[in-house]
Amino acid sequence: MTPEQFRTIGYRLVDWIAEYRANLPSRCVMSNERPGAIREKLASFPPYSGDEFDAVLADFERVIVPGITHWNHPSFFASAPSSTSLAAVLGELLASGLGVSCTTWHASPAGTELEELVMDWFRQMLGLSDAFHGVIHDSSSTAALVAALCARERATDDQRLGAGLHASSPLTAYTSDQAHGCVEKALLLAGIGRQHIRFIETDERYAMRADLLRTRIEDDIRAGMLPCVVVATIGTHDTAGVDPLVPIGRVASRYGVWLHIDAATAGAAMVAPECRPHWTGIESADSLAVDLHRWLGAGMDCTAYYVRDTDRLQRVMSTSHHGTMDDETTSYRHWGIPSDRRFRALKCWFLLREQGTNGLIERVRRDIQHAKWLEAQVRKADGWEVAAPVLFQTVCVRHIPHGLSSAEITSAEIDQHNLRWVERVNESGKAYLTSTLIDGRRVARISIGAEATELSHIRDLWALMQQCAGAR
């Protein structure tokens, strides 16, 4: 493709994206394609010679688009927010067009220094002290793995450079029974066996009990184990529960255990100063992760990972035995797992320049207000229950069929009923929800946070929920 051909096709694609975003509310949120249908419509063998791009775009419209679930739809309430601001889309386009690798300062000076800048901007926006230094990872899953590796090496005095884990006592790790599955995955990949991962029970607000954490650590020490890392959560996936960082931080500090904070989605709320009491005690953390690609709209994939001990991070992430710091510049290849790194900082810079701190604060406040509005409607309605505290933008609800009490219907029947009405909502194409289990009960989970979502969409969702829950 020549630059002139790219110019012509590029204009068409920008027009397509603009039209797509403008007309998103008219689309069904979920794809209704059956498994295997997409591949059946495409060739089984790679093309021998290149196609005209008109043919590629035609297949994109005919085959790919119908198989898309629209995460930027204003009625997307499933999983967690994952909106992409159009400013970030333009930054992503430029980053791809430049095609640079931001491994060292010399590889791309602007790439390194812009990442330093935007990570410091976000640090200030989140209310973190300058003791934290940031780097962009692809996901909070990768950030959790990097934290687990750093914790492991600190606990074992860098034994990866010698006999490895074979030379240490059995390592143990701690997280809550509400932690995201990526935490367990990271701990397993770091070599901490499943039988040595302690899932600490939570209280009535689905927050880790620091007293039980301390007891488990002391029990493990007496048993000859080596406590390695505690992973606390700000905004658990199912209920948006908040672990108490002050007492957890005291426990971690007392026993010399690395403390990592998974704040993937709810961490974004901290741009609003009134939300910051939720993570009082954050300064006791050794590391923390906030997904910029979720609530804040930077677009997949972009996670801010902050760490206090950058020397430790670089020693663990480098294979050099002679130090990893360049004389005067930052080498981000020593701040994470991959050696090659995309220019993700550019879309973050575009996003922040276009939205401003105040724009992001207002979006967070708007979504929390929408969640509170929905919570109030559910509490007022007969047969509806709010299943967990509403702290941020996640609302968990449960419905008991009209005319019946919980004593007149089995819990299994209520679970099936709630599963069915959520399925009806999704099958309607008008909204997309997910369900989960809380205390063994099936509930619907509404996650608000798409950039285009307004109160009118929440009102429509509530009406649809009532309609689908009352269907027979």
Image (cartoon, rainbow, N blue to C red):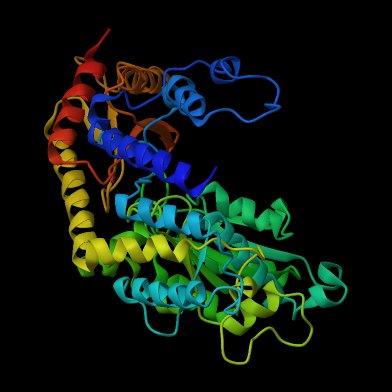
Quadrant where the C terminus sits is top left
* x and y percentages locating residue 424 in the rendered image: 32, 17
Q: Residue furthest bottom?
A: 327
Among the 4 quarters of the image, the one containing residue 272: bottom left
* x and y percentages locating residue 140 in the rendered image: 51, 57
Relative to residue 472, is residue 329 drawn left or right? right
* x and y percentages locating residue 290 in the rendered image: 42, 62
Q: Nearer the viewer, residue 472 or 95?
A: 95
Quadrant where the N terminus sits is top right
* x and y percentages locating residue 306 in the rendered image: 48, 72
Residue 192, relative to residue 10: is it above or below?
Answer: below
Residue 357, relative to residue 199: is it above or below?
Answer: below
Residue 146 visible from this viewpoint: yes
Residue 243 visible from this viewpoint: no
Q: Which residue is drawn at 47% across and 49% down?
A: 178
Q: Which residue is drawn at 32% across and 56% down?
A: 296
Q: Which of 391 and 92 is in front in this view?
A: 92
Relative to residue 102, is residue 418 drawn left or right? left
Q: Residue at x 14, y 32 (%)?
A: 459
Among the 4 quarters of the image, the one containing residue 230: bottom right
Residue 384, relative to residue 116: is it above or below?
Answer: above
